[in-house]
Image: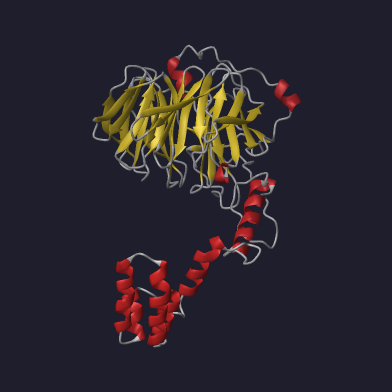
Amino acid sequence: RQQFLELLEARKLKHALLILQNQLSTLTTDIQQLHRLSSLLMCPSAEDLRTAAYWDGSGGRSRFLVLESLQGYISPGTMVPVHRMETLFGQALAYQCEVCKYHVRPANQGLYVDHTCPTSVFPQELQFNLKGHQDEVWYVAFSPDGRYLASGSRDKTCIIWSMDDFSIAHRLTGHEDEVAYIAWSPNSKYIVSASSDRTLRLWDVEAGANLQLFTGHDETVTSCKWLGTNDRFISGGLDHKIIIWNTNGTIIKQISSPRVHDLAVSADCSLLLVADEKTDIHAYDLATLTFMYSLNEPTEVMSMALSADARHCITGLRNGELHMWDLDARARVREFSGHAQGQYVIRCTFAGLDDRLVATGSEDGLLFVWNRNTGQLLARLRGHTKTINVCTWSDQAAALATASDDKTICIWPAFHGAPSHRSDPKAGPADSNEPEEISDDEEEEEEEDDDDDKSMGSAARSSAASLDMAF
């Protein structure tokens, strides 16, 4: 076809007709295509030919596209594959990112030097200690646009913090019990809060107003996630219910399930993972809410998290271990340990660019971060005096936030581009500007926290203290 069109373009009609009769007609059984090609013989000019054939001419990309289509039939030893050099460069950069110990910023220096993130890009300096809650802070999350930080507490309130000056933009009241979970809408205009009072509430972030109350659960609501749009979200609780809601308050769909400790939804909203109160992670087809398979752990699953590409999941276990699963193979591929966990739920998360890090809090007040590929422990950072319940990272805000039973939220700048040292009278300075990594000897000397008022017997606490962290 390419030869036929080029002959027509050069106005060599007799040669083109021979190609059509002797070659094209023997290579295809599509009579209509032969008729279309025959009609091109009537084009009065090369320009008319290119228009009628939807062809860019011999001087365009047509020859390259023909060569590319033939690549699959020619040995790479005979003809170098298309884009081979670009592919090799891409593989080199991907490998450098793969072996980068602290991978928290893009590989943007090209191929002149090998990519590596130095220790200095890691969160090491505590910037602010936000004090606004009257009791333990159980959840914290950045808005997708990085303008706000939302926190939920045992004091039954949510606080919207402005990331411009770390001030309190709104204090949201209305729940009658602890706020266990918070989820931001994709457009950063709304949050949904889940509570031990068996309800969820929808809030307008700019106005600080409660827009809707959702009543459908019979026990503590432990988790909620938005479903890709700004008008639907899903919730799970200890009442054996998973519910998909419309923001107008109506129930779209509901199924019976195990008692829910945690939920995770893939970015394309095709996969739902449910961590039950025992030893299993259950996978559902989110479109139909039909069960697909389960992953079984040796001990109680306290939390879990799903990678951005939905290919891996990590589970936090009561015995103080994190396990990473390959969801395609449905096999456990790596373990992480060292943190203190057993009595309380502390939710784990993937972190870093391309989910190259794994992070969790600890009952001794430390933040643990590992390299996902090697399992190497990268840091144990102290900024809190009690259990860290949650941490979260925002690329837009260029900061890490952690929340704790000590009633505070810590803001940690990471690599260059993080918020500068902004001051605000409502946000107290950090108690320590250099939270060094904690040695084993120092860790053994730590005094145990006074946690008499908390136990795994509290359904609200055991399902709500959470850790979501991403560098």
Residue 146 visible? The answer is yes
Q: Residue at x 56, y 46 (%)?
A: 353
In depth, the one of 403 and 167 nearer the eye is 403
Rendering coords of residue 104 (x, y %): 60, 47
In depth, the one of 46 and 177 nearer the eye is 46
Count of labels shown?
Answer: 0
* Residue furthest right as drawn: 441
Q: Is 289 displayed left or right of 448 in the figure?
A: left
Rendering coords of residue 160 (x, y %): 40, 37
Tell me, what colour scheme is on the image? secondary structure
Quarter of the image for the C terminus: give it: top right
Indicate the quadrant where residue 50 lies: bottom left
Rendering coords of residue 321 (x, y %): 61, 24
Q: Residue at x 29, y 78 (%)?
A: 39
Q: Residue at x 38, y 77 (%)?
A: 21
Residue 409 visible? The answer is no
Q: Examine the rendered structure and indicate whether residue 104 appears above or below residue 134.
A: below
Indicate the quadrant where residue 1 lies: bottom left
Rendering coords of residue 318 (x, y %): 57, 19
